[in-house]
């Protein structure tokens, strides 16, 4: 499958929920430490190279991106200068971004669109907060401030419109209900910083967490004293974890050890596959909702790979 | 800037697990390595890297008695220059410059001889040539000069070479010595015979006769083994020349393709019998000094993008070069200072280096430098050195490049970085760092890997 070279270091990839051949890539110059950012919208061409549909530049690194579940042209990005920017693919680059929301006081590290209600999205930031936004309002609807350190990721529950989880460097995952005044559950999931979490798409009580301690843990929020499963195999901090939209027990992860792993957390020998195609930190991974088994990854080696699980990502 | 430091701190904490990381106050990142010993290529291969696509030398022969005793110096240089062109199928018109390191011959005469040699080798008149003299490191300096000129964009393809015929140009001094030198101790020390500086090193740093003789035995043993197993065949270009029989005056045509100074039967017992040459109670003998030799070497360098376009194999990448000054009275300590300087400027640490080629001007300084840098003997001069093979002053640097890069090629991926260094008369040292090219390993290097996490040690 084809490869796309980005000028900056990759930070995140996301397949479009509307078009099976489209994906967005968030990138940052100089490893996201200093410099500009760029978000690329890429189109897979049948048996051809990856074509760039459009690209938008930002004044600081782009750490994450997500597609609107409601409008196929709307893309939201988390920018390192603390802003959240909305882009409309139907408009020319000069008319973009259509909105730039400045509320976070530090780097915004993740953004996630509500897949159930489809009208709102969450951002989480190194300023220790999570914010809830809707497209039609110029300011955030609510700020969730309980974490004691950077919040690296916040993800909506795929079944409940008001429930989400947030993963933080304070070594906890918190479960929130936006109708409640405070978090409804605190999960001290790891002894070390937690960099990512994701809900199981088939069981709304199961959540996976990825940590600096190199492990991925799978939890049932109803009995959170012991994890259902601990997935060992990465040799450095696990940067991102993602449940498969197609198989209930399949998990994809990427890590600072430069590999991308696939896991089946229900079986004893959980590691299903390991891809070592990246030559720098692998930081972005996504699985297509529309094409079963289609994976995309990006990393600090400035490359975006899209391939079918089971094939070699590097194969031309 | 504070923002950038904070970002680095957050990311660094991801790599250094400890439960209270974010309460740490000071950020301390490890050295940002330009390259390291990772199992894979971490540094991207850049198109403007200076790479070596070919490196050859003549066999080295004892001066006055050896195979080249009746050979003109230009006839030594021409075959290696010609080999570079023939073996790579390069159009000689494309060569931007040829730089020849050469020491003892009169400057202008040697420059003329080199120009003539280029014509013998088939270079057109449009290709320029010049000489460079940094004493014993002239050959390496020539290679470094070409690399620098390619980096600077003066040209894309160049040749660094070395040439010395110590038969025709023995060491000496012409004219009188400025009496003023007496008022400057370092200046006066520049006039010391090299052997005396060797005695000074042995005396000042306590290198025993036994250690020196042992190093000489090792050098001969390794060089003999390398010759016997045909290792030098890859790098030696045979020279067809004549030898005049001193008694009968008959001319005989010969082809010389083997170093003639190596004595496989050298032993501690035989060396122990030799008398010190430079000082009555000294320890430097003819057996534990480098041999006086004739020879030449040449290295073809170009930009990586050009090499790839031409489909030429990349033997190595020129990473860094450093020349430093030391006390002229102990000039032999040069490598001990120059190697760390070159390694540092390549963004590496000494442990990252897999192979060393250190010129054995004298066993005393060679032993001292290895001890001072705590080098693993398994990594240094694995195919012997100047005590066995010979030290034609200006050619030695180019000879070392050929020997090092061919050995690195044989060793494959296990051997990523190599260093060449030598001491320099009048008190200097020079060193250069080379990285193995990224050609595919030969099958004979295949071996089982126990554990492989594919991570470099700089992140561990």
Image (cartoon, grey):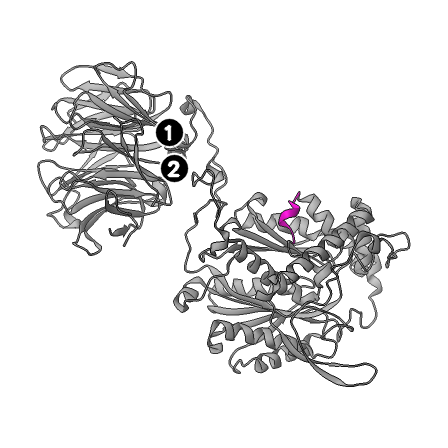
Give the chain of mark 2. A
- The numbered mark at residue A295 is none
Nearer the N terminus, badge 1 or badge 2? 1
Q: In the image, is B220 to the left or to the right of A302?
A: right
Read off the residue under disc 2. Answer: A257
Residue B131: percent from left, percent from top? 63, 71
Specify start and end residues of the magenta stretch as a single range.
B374-381
Answer few, some or many: residues within 10 Å of disc 2's Cα (few below 14, many 20 plus, some between 14 and 19).
Answer: many
Residue A21: percent from left, percent from top? 15, 47
Is residue B357 placed above or below B399 in the rendered structure? above
Q: Can residue A7 be spotted in the picture?
A: yes
Q: In the image, is A17 to the left or to the right of B11?
A: left
Residue B408: percent from left, percent from top? 55, 55
Residue under disc 1 on the same chain as residue under disc 2: yes
User: What secondary structure is the stretch in magenta mostly built from?
Assistant: loop
Residue A292: percent from left, percent from top? 16, 40
Give the chain of mark 1. A
Q: Nearer the viewer, residue A236 or A122?
A: A236
Instruction: Please check the rendered image and state whether residue B250 is part of the magenta-colored stretch, yes or no.
Output: no
Read off the residue under disc 1. Answer: A214
């Amino acid at each position: 499958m084809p490869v796309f070279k980005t000028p900056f270091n990759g930070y995140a990839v996301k397949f479009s929920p509307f078009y099976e051949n489209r994906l967005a890539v968030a990138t940052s110059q100089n490893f996201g430490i200093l410099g500009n950012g760029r978000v690329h919208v890429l189109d897979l061409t049948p048996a051809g190279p990856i074509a760039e549909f459009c690209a938008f530049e930002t004044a600081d690194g782009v750490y994450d991106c997500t597609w609107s579940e409601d409008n196929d042209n709307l893309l939201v990005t988390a920018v390192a200068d603390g802003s959240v920017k909305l882009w409309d693919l139907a408009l020319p680059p000069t008319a973009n971004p259509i909105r730039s929301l400045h509320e976070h006081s530090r780097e915004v590290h993740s953004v996630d669109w509500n897949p159930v209600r489809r009208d709102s999205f969450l951002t989480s930031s190194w300023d220790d907060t999570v914010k809830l936004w809707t497209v039609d309002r110029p300011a955030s609807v609510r700020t969730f401030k309980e974490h004691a350190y950077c919040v690296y990721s916040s993800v909506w529950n795929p079944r409940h419109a008001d429930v989400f989880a947030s993963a933080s460097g304070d070594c906890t995952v918190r479960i929130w209900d936006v109708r409640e005044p405070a978090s409804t559950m605190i999960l001290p999931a790891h002894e070390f910083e937690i960099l990512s979490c994701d809900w199981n798409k088939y069981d709304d009580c199961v959540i996976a967490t990825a940590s600096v301690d190199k492990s991925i843990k799978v939890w049932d929020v109803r009995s959170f004293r012991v994890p259902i499963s601990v997935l060992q195999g990465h040799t450095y901090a696990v940067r991102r974890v993602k449940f498969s939209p197609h198989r209930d027990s399949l998990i994809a992860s990427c890590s600072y050890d430069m590999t991308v792993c696939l896991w089946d957390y229900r079986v004893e020998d959980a590691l299903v596959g390991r891809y070592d195609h990246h030559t720098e930190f692998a930081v972005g991974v996504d699985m297509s909702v529309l094409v079963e088994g289609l994976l995309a990854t990006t990393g600090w080696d400035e490359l975006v790979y899209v391939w079918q699980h089971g094939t070699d990502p590097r194969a031309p | 800037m504070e923002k950038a430091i904070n970002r680095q701190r957050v990311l660094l904490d991801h790599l250094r697990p400890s439960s209270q990381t974010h309460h740490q106050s000071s950020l301390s990142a490890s050295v940002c390595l330009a390259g390291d010993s990772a199992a894979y290529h971490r540094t991207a291969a850049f198109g403007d890297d200076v790479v070596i696509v070919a490196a050859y030398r003549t066999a080295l022969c004892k001066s006055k008695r050896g195979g080249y005793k009746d050979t003109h110096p230009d006839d030594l240089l021409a075959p290696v220059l010609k080999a570079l062109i023939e073996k790579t199928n390069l159009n000689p018109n494309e060569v931007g410059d040829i730089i020849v390191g050469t020491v003892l011959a009169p400057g202008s005469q040697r420059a003329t001889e080199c120009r003539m040699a280029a014509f013998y080798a088939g270079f057109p008149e449009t290709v320029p040539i010049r000489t460079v003299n940094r004493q014993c490191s002239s050959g390496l300096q020539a290679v470094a000069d070409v690399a620098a000129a390619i980096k600077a964009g003066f040209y894309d393809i160049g040749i660094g070479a070395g040439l010395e015929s110590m038969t025709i140009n023995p060491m000496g001094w012409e004219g009188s010595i400025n009496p003023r030198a007496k008022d400057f101790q370092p200046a006066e020390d520049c006039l010391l015979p090299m052997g005396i500086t060797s005695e000074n090193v042995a005396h000042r740093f306590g290198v025993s006769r036994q250690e020196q003789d042992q190093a000489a035995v090792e050098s001969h043993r390794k060089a003999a083994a390398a010759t016997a197993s045909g290792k030098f065949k890859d790098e030696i270009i045979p020279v067809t020349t004549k030898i005049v029989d001193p008694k009968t005056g008959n001319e005989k045509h010969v082809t010389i393709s083997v170093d003639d100074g190596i004595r496989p039967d050298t032993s501690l017992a035989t060396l122990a019998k030799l008398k010190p040459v430079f000082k009555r109670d000294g320890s430097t003998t003819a057996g534990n000094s480098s041999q006086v030799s004739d020879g030449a070497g040449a290295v073809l360098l170009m930009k990586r993008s050009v090499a790839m376009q031409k489909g030429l194999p990349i033997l190595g990448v020129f990473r860094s070069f450093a020349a430093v000054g030391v006390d002229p009275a102990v000039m032999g300590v040069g490598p001990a200072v120059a190697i760390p300087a070159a390694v540092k400027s390549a963004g590496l640490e000494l442990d990252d280096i897999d192979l060393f080629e250190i010129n054995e001007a004298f066993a005393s300084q060679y032993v001292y430098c290895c001890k001072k840098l705590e080098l693993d003997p398994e990594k240094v001069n694995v195919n012997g050195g100047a005590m066995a093979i010979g030290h034609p002053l200006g050619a030695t640097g180019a000879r070392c490049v050929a020997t090092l890069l061919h050995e690195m090629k044989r060793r494959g991926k296990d051997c990523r970085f190599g260093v060449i260094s030598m001491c320099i008369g009048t008190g200097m040292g020079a060193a250069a760092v080379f990285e193995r090219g990224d050609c595919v390993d030969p099958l004979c290097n295949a071996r089982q890997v126990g554990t492989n996490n594919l991570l470099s040690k700089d992140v561990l």
